[in-house]
Image: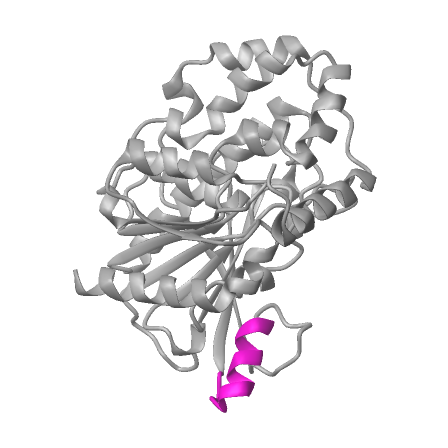
Amino acid sequence: MRWNLHSLVDVAGQRNMWRYRWPPVESTPAELERLLAIPEEDLHPPVAPAEFTWRERRLPMRPAFASEAAASAERARRTGAAGDLDEDHFTFPSPRPCRDELVDTVHCVRWRPAGRTGSETALVVAHGAFAETHGRTLMYMPEPARAAWDTVAIELPHHMRRRSARSEFSGQYLVSADIPRLIRGMHQAEADIRALVGGLRTLGYARVVLGGVSLGGNAVLEALVRQEADGAFAIVPAVDAYASLWESVLGRCFRRTGNAAGIADEAARLALRLITPVHMGRPAIPAGRLLLVYGTEDLLCPAEPVRLLGNRWGGCRERALRAGHATMILMRGKVRRIVAGWMGALARA
């Protein structure tokens, strides 16, 4: 391990999470074996386009960090722009239910410049693990109030309003040592994104682009293997589930718990391939329409698996920045410019 500011921040942040109250491993090693025996087509069945239930709410953007779009509001304040956005909330039933009504109701938010209708492009963004709001994800995105596209944020299973009643914090019952539950949750996330893409096309969007951060990057890349989109990008994506969730500093906590519950390291490695995009096939879009942004010093989502994914899928646009997983947020301005330039090139293609 190369010690520097970025790695020290990653280690400190992940070790701090050891103090969290993690849920028990409720699955058994036998369930893990059964999961590995399921045919690929049954793990990822077709999904129908989502049918949305809408409720509209106009949100004047002010520079208050309590806002969901706080980053957008703050940038609007600094630049003197009005920054007003129309904010629409909608839900739809998950196509891969887990028999928990809270988790199985998919919540989404759509932002677009106030008064604008008829945009041809929707940008779907998926947040990282343990996110309580979309605020941190939006910090990496171009300013929604000035963008030429509508921004749609999806809440992943077991996060935010999709937390089960027994959950003490966002993401607690998704990212943990219970690997079968994690795999089912990520497959649900992937199916939710595919259904959302279909639903947005039904609304009339000619182009749908996917974007994800960290865990959301994994979900987006998984969905991309089976769902055609007009482009996709992933920022510090967790493309190697075993490296991120079993071998990282945070993963060591999960590994000890999993081993104590009878989940051997080799069984975990084989099972986590089911949510590792490089082992799931090739993307349903030309790889040239895929952007990967990663940190060379990232200890949670290491750079090497991202490079491997780009090499195997071929033609991906890659941007490596000298940052760790946590310190990438300090590069958010550069990341926004990279994403905005790439989105502009997609629109001209």
Q: Is residue 26 something that shows in the picture?
A: no
Residue pictured at 56% horizontal, 30% vertical: 243
View extreme (left): residue: 349
Residue 184 percent location from the top left of the image = 56, 28
Per the rendered image, the range of residues in magenta is: 70-83
Residue 141 percent location from the top left of the image = 45, 64
Residue pictured at 28% horizontal, 60% vertical: 204
Q: Main secondary structure of the magenta part?
A: helix
Quadrant the N terminus occupies: top right
**Along the viewing direction, whichever of 157 and 209 lies nearer the viewer:** 209
Residue pictured at 68% horizontal, 25% vertical: 178
Q: Quadrant of residue 57?
A: bottom right
Q: Quadrant of residue 340?
A: bottom left
Considering only vertical position in the picture, is 334 above or below 216? below
Residue pictured at 75% horizontal, 47% vertical: 169
Residue 135 percent location from the top left of the image = 59, 64
